[in-house]
Amino acid sequence: MHRLAIRADLLDFTGAPAWGSTDLSGVRWRPDHWLLIEGERIAGALPGAQPPGEDWRLDDQRGRLLMPGFIDTHVHCPQLDVIASHGTGLLDWLETYTFPAERRFADPTVAAEGAARFLDALLAHGTTAAVVFPTVHAVSADTLFAAAAQRGMRLITGKVLMDRHAPDGLRDAPHDQGAEAERACEALIQRWHGQGRNAYAVTVRFAVTSTPQQLAMAGALLARHAGLYMQTHVAENRDEVRWVAELFPQARSYLDVYDQAGLLNERAVLAHGIWLDAQDRARLRDRGAQIAFCPSSNLFLGSGLFEWPAAIAAGHKVSLATDVGGGTSLSMLRTAAEAYKVVALQGSQVGSPLSAWTALHAATLGAAQGLGLSHEMGHLGAGALADLVLWDWAVGPVATHRDAVALGQVAGLPAQDLHARVFAWMLLGDERNLRQTYVAGRLSHERGRHGPQFATLL
Ligand SMILES: [Zn+2]
């Protein structure tokens, strides 16, 4: 079996850090250690001065940071085409930019190229697992699953369900009571769910674009197949919330529309959750569902400020996500930096500022636990698949100087604690800091080497 040991500073989590805490509770910090990888799994770790024996290939990356790969719990594959589009809020943005781009994915060639480009971009940003929206076209889910299987990545996705309030070419047929869309989902579930690291998510775009009949069909799929995931959007924008209230007058709230359809369970991932009340948050907790907090998207589209501390107080799960193309970067580091600013904007109402520990936990172990996959990923413990990213602590003169300050190498300034150093890395770092990405023990991206030819260079 292929045996590899990488020497670096190892950082991961063993539990959820307390909100606002900058000490090391929940944090596993092993500076200058060898991480041992046997085949596709992590086998353990050794101090830097004690390398493993001769039958290990040694890769000395001393002075760099090795972490579990990031998990992006909400991102749209076809929206790389519309990232950074100017001038609209959610509903106009969908109409003007997103729907025309998504219509192209009916073409199998466009879908296959889009899936490959998207997954390679995730790896180049340090993301090794994702919960992904393709388009309404079954082929867009098929091509994503196939491309993820080729790369060995953990992928959760499913054909988008939309049967109203969407343009021609992007709607499921309503005329047959939704039977066609249901058949398409069933076929994809048979083909991909539980195949390798692929898992199917019943994917309702949002309450506006599904009839009550289609929502009921989605709930029936979840009831019929244990172990499916569910993904959707909820309470992102105030105009959207008002529209949902008009469309579903019998529902107590936007979230309640989904709950009544049987869509909320411990495998449900709902993006945004900005405009929720205390009853909604309690419902999320009771159902075991999670909110994917998408700060760069929420700021870019002017949607609002997610109240992370309120979620913690209510006891429901929160993960971190880019929501490209509403979000403006696939980088989970940039996303974490935006999350910090969203919390900061809420000032003293929320108590402590967001710690680097809470943000990075949510992007690794917290996300893995929320998805029921912490046996597989999200940490550097023995037995997990070796989904890893090797990072430079600093790139460029400003970050390099800032890192030296944290280390106490600048005369007249005291050395800072680990949290201060990691926080500066999180705020100043991005994909340029990334050296290597491993997926299940296989080198899958390396700085300066990317694109379709990369596989042949391994
Ligand atoms: Zn989204």
Image (cartoon, rainbow, N blue to C red):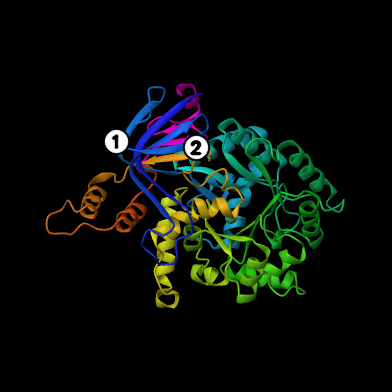
* Alpha carbon separation for disc pair 2 and 1: 22 Å
Residue 455 in magenta stretch: yes
| Residue 168 placement (x, y as % from top left) | 73, 50
Q: Secondary structure at mark 1?
A: loop
Q: Which residue is mark 1?
A: 49
Within 10 Å of disc 2 (Cα), the crowding (few <14, some 14-19, many 20+) is many
Q: Is residue 144 above or below residue 340?
A: above
Q: Quadrant of ligand 1?
A: bottom right
In the rendered structure, the answer to whether residue 290 lies left or right of residue 437 reads right
Tag count in the figure?
A: 2
Some atom of ligand 1 lies within 8 Å of the CB belonging to the residue at label 2? no
Q: On screen, 280 above or below 319? A: below
Q: In the image, residue 403 lies at what x, y percent?
A: 25, 51
Depth check: 123 or 363 in front? Answer: 363
The reply, left or right, for residue 314 in relation to residue 418 is right
Q: Is residue 427 visible?
A: yes
Q: Label 2, on which residue?
A: 386
> Residue 98: x percent and y percent?
59, 51
Task: Determine the residue located farthest toward the bottom in the rendered image.
Answer: 349
Q: Decide if residue 206 is on the left or right side of residue 58.
A: right
Quarter of the figure with residue 47: top left
The answer to which of 248 and 315 lies nearer the viewer is 315
Who's the residue at 21% across and 57% down the image? Answer: 415
Q: Which secondary structure, mark 2?
A: loop
* Amino acid type, callout 2: Ala
Seen in the picture, residue 257 relative to 184 is either above or below; the reply is: below
Front one among 153 and 241: 153
Label of residue 274 in the image: none
- Residue span colored magenta: 433-458
